[in-house]
């Protein structure tokens, strides 16, 4: 199973070189399970950062730094959407002001045209194209789309529709986890 | 709903409607025109005007002290903001001391400022916190629970040992009891209170008072 550990620190004091005068500076660090972070981790960090900046209300905390650290514990496919879900749960748990929630869904397009949601590593290798979408909770808008491989425009629209339907299940999971946490206190 | 509606923490006005920005339980107080707010759990403190907090003195810069209050910036406290302080009569505050005060300026654009006197010039319990005792950090939700009127936890603890307690809205609690062991026992109970139900707490206290 794919699992990612997320830790969020903030809003904390920012270095003068990094602080922005009107909003919070969001930084994402992604650490792979083995080895040093490389170019792939850097590009994923930027994707996550831009997705999070779209939902976090940074204007409420100017000149601060929000740091999100993600550690990959195990990778069995659909890593990017697992990171997106972990990031959203970390933002929820820390109590940062958010405009909307988001979730990550991965679609694999197989050579015969069928769509597989949340593929395993094996299915990802056999697929023709892998699409990852970050979907917001407000009217299921698309925040981020990442494609590996080639597919036609209609296939992408079909994958998007399937991902939007699957996003409901993820948001329900968020809701259940939060409810369990608040029922204890 | 018509009439005036007060938005508390966790809610923001966006256009014609309301936006919920934090996750938690939605609460409603019907008194005085109706107020809605979201009770959320968090550990990081954001300075709010009027909050009473415990700060740690980190530096003395001329006429002001810099205090660490657990937010994103250090707060400033002028040496004249103590009861009975004049330019000749400075308060005896050193680096590393604990100070209990309230915020007089705290918004997102400016550095937070604290004072240790209230609007009439009296200290009303604020000021330098004495030597000894133990300072520790808990989540903000537990502090709000402890500050509610008629809190059972504090009443039950006071039947166990006599102690002094200062609660800061930034999640910091300072406890002092007669011996070090009693202080540590109270610290452990307060930290565990966040996750214990009322029955578990009563059992733990009964075991301790029986010892």
Image (spheres, coloured by chain):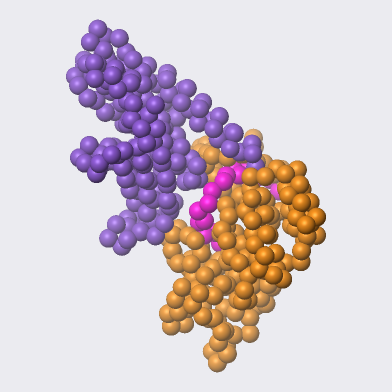
Chain colours: A purple, B orange
User: Eyeballing the image, is B100 above or below B2?
Assistant: below
Residue A115 appears in which quarter of the rendering? top left
* Quarter of the C terminus of chain A within the rendering: top right
Residue at figure coordinates x 57%, y 46% from the top left: B41
Does B132 lie within the magenta span?
no
Residue B166 or residue B149, whichever sits in front: B166
For residue B144, side relative to residue B80 (left or right):
right
| Percent of width and height locating residue B73 | 43, 63
Residue that protrudes farthest toward the front in the picture? B211
Which x, y percent locates residue A34?
Answer: 28, 39
Residue at coordinates 75% horizontally, 43% vertically from top-left? Answer: B199
User: Quadrant of the rendered structure where residue B87 is?
Assistant: bottom right
Task: Report the residue at 67% width, 54% height from top.
Answer: B189
Residue lying farthest to the top in this orientation: A112
Which residues lie in the magenta part?
A: B32-52
* Image position, residue A169 (x, y; %): 47, 22
Q: Main secondary structure of the magenta part?
A: loop
Residue at far bottom of view: B88
Q: Nearer the viewer, residue B96 or B119?
A: B96
Question: From the viewer's perspective, is residue B19 above or below residue A137?
Answer: below
What x and y, as percent, mark residue A184?
64, 39
For the image shown, how many numbered marks are present on the structure?
0
Determine if residue A182 is in view: yes
């Amino acid at each position: 199973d794919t699992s990612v550990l997320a830790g969020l620190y903030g809003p904390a004091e920012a270095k003068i070189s990094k602080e922005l005068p009107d909003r919070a500076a969001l930084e994402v660090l992604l650490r792979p399970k083995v080895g040093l972070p490389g170019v792939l981790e850097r590009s994923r960090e930027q994707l996550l950062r831009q997705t999070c900046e779209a939902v976090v209300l940074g204007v409420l905390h100017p000149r601060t730094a929000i740091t999100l650290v993600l550690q990959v514990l195990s990778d069995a496919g659909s890593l990017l959407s697992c990171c997106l879900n972990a990031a959203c749960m970390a933002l929820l748990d820390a109590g940062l002001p958010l405009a909307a929630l988001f979730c990550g869904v991965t679609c694999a397009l197989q050579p015969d045209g069928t769509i597989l949601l949340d593929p395993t590593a094996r299915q990802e290798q056999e697929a023709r194209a892998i699409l990852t979408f970050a979907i917001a909770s407000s009217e299921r808008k698309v925040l981020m789309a990442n494609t590996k491989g080639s597919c036609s425009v209609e296939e992408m629209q079909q994958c998007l529709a399937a991902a939007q339907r699957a996003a409901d299940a993820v948001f329900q999971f968020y809701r259940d986890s939060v409810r369990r946490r608040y029922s204890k206190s | 709903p018509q009439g005036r509606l007060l938005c508390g923490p966790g809610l923001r006005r966006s256009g014609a409607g309301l936006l919920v920005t934090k996750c938690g339980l939605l609460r409603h107080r019907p008194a005085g025109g109706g107020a809605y707010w979201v009770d959320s759990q968090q550990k990081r403190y954001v300075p709010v005007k009027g909050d009473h907090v415990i700060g740690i003195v980190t530096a003395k810069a001329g006429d002001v002290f810099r205090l660490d209050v657990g937010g994103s910036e250090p707060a400033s406290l002028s040496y004249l903001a103590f009861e009975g302080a004049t330019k000749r009569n400075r308060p005896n505050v050193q680096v590393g001391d604990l100070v209990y005060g309230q915020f007089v300026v705290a918004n997102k654009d400016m550095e937070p400022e604290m004072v240790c006197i209230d609007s009439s010039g009296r200290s009303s319990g604020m000021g330098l916190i004495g030597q000894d005792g133990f300072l520790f950090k808990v989540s903000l939700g537990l502090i709000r629970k402890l500050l509610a009127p008629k809190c059972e936890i504090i009443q039950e603890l006071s039947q166990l040992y006599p102690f002094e307690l200062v609660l800061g809205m930034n999640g910091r609690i300072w406890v002092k009891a007669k011996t070090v062991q009693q202080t540590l026992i109270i610290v452990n109970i307060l930290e565990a209170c966040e996750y214990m139900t009322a029955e578990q707490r009563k059992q733990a206290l009964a075991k301790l008072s029986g010892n």
